[in-house]
Amino acid sequence: MGMIIRLLVTAAVALLLSRILSGVTFDSFGTALIFAVVLGILNLFVKPVLHLFGLPFTIITLGLFALVINAAVILIADYFIDGMQIDGFWWAFIFSIALSLITSLLNGIFSSGDD
């Protein structure tokens, strides 16, 4: 049940951010929900590989390269989803930071009563 709530929260936040950020668009909530699922799959399989290959850069930049990896994962998700459009790397970078911060906050609020 917790995973479904996290997916719904991610989809809702992504759709809300698309209303705020002009460089990010979703056709519908269904597209945002598909984005949340694809993002979860990419975070499970692709992101660890990118972190492994980017480890030297992450160490040199004191962890800031991880933000670039997050933006790259968002752009990969954009590539696979037809109803989603991101207008370049910087929009993906801003979107990934905002999405991470807001979903972390909301997931912490919603999952605090599950324990």
Image: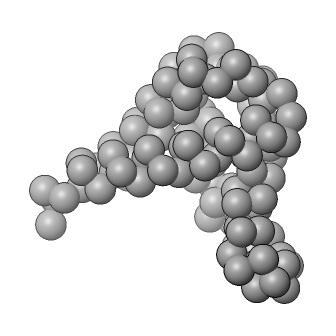
Query: For residue 78, which quarter of the picture?
Result: top right
Is the residue 46 above or below the residue 12 in the image? below
**Residue visible at 13% across and 56% down?**
113
Instruction: Please name the colour scheme applied to the rendered image.
Output: one colour
Vertical relation: 16 (above or below) 54: above
Compared with residue 68, is residue 103 higher up or lower down, i.e. above or below? above
Q: Residue at x 15, y 66 (%)?
A: 115
The quadrant holding residue 21 is top right
Report the residue at 54% width, 43% height from top: 99
Q: Count the numbered circles shown.
A: 0
Closer to the camera in the image, 76 or 86? 86
Q: Is residue 49 visible?
A: no
- 60 is higher (above) or lower (below) than 75: below
Residue plotted at (70% across, 19% down):
22
For the residue pair 106 and 111, the one nearer the viewer reads as 106
Q: Position of residue 72 (x, y in %)?
A: 80, 53
- Residue 90: x %, y % from top left: 80, 40
Residue 20 picture location, percent across and down: 57, 21
Q: Single out the residue that lies furthest toward the top.
A: 27
Q: Position of residue 110 (x, y in %)?
A: 24, 48
The residue furthest front is 61
Residue 69: quarter of image? bottom right
Report if residue 72 is visible in the image: yes
